[in-house]
Amino acid sequence: MKGRVKWWSNEKGYGFIEYNDNQNIFAHIEQKDRQNYHIEENQEIEFTLITKENSTFLKLITLENKA
């Protein structure tokens, strides 16, 4: 799936991703992995949604360069 970063805090490592015409999902990057990412609002991303134990998670696959 592809989406767009709606809001993100690099300091806290979480935010919201918008996909499928205004659907939003909460996303979080573990503290040990945060130095590998710098995410900006409106940045395009590619991801997979995973459902486990009645919860849906976002698995980040790639970040696309901001136009």
Image (cartoon, grey):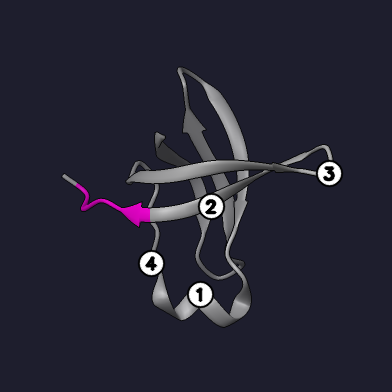
Which residue is under mark 2? 59
Which residue is under mark 3? 53
Identify which amino acid the numbered label 4 is placed on.
His
Cα distance, mark 3 to mark 2? 16 Å
- Foreground: disc 4 or disc 3: 3
| Residue 50 image-quadrant placement | top right
Stretch in magenta: 62-66
Crowd around label 2: few <14 · some 14–19 · many ≥20 (10 Å): some
Q: Which of the marked residues, 2 or 4, is nearer the chain's N terminus?
A: 4
Q: Are marks 3 and 2 in contact (CB under 8 Å)?
A: no
Identify which amino acid the numbered label 3 is placed on.
Glu
Instruction: Give how far across and how far down residue 5 sits, in percent.
Output: 43, 43
The residue located at (22%, 49%) in the rendering is: 66
Location of the N terminus by quadrant is: top left
35 or 41: nearer the viewer: 35
Instruction: Give how far across and how far down residue 55 sits, in percent.
Output: 78, 41
Q: Which mark is residue 38?
A: 4
- Foreground: disc 3 or disc 2: 3
- Residue 53, magenta (yes or no): no
Instruction: Give how far across and how far down residue 67 sits, in percent.
Output: 16, 44
Q: Name the secondary structure under disc 1.
A: helix
Cα distance, mark 4 to mark 1? 8 Å
The residue located at (52%, 77%) in the rendering is: 33
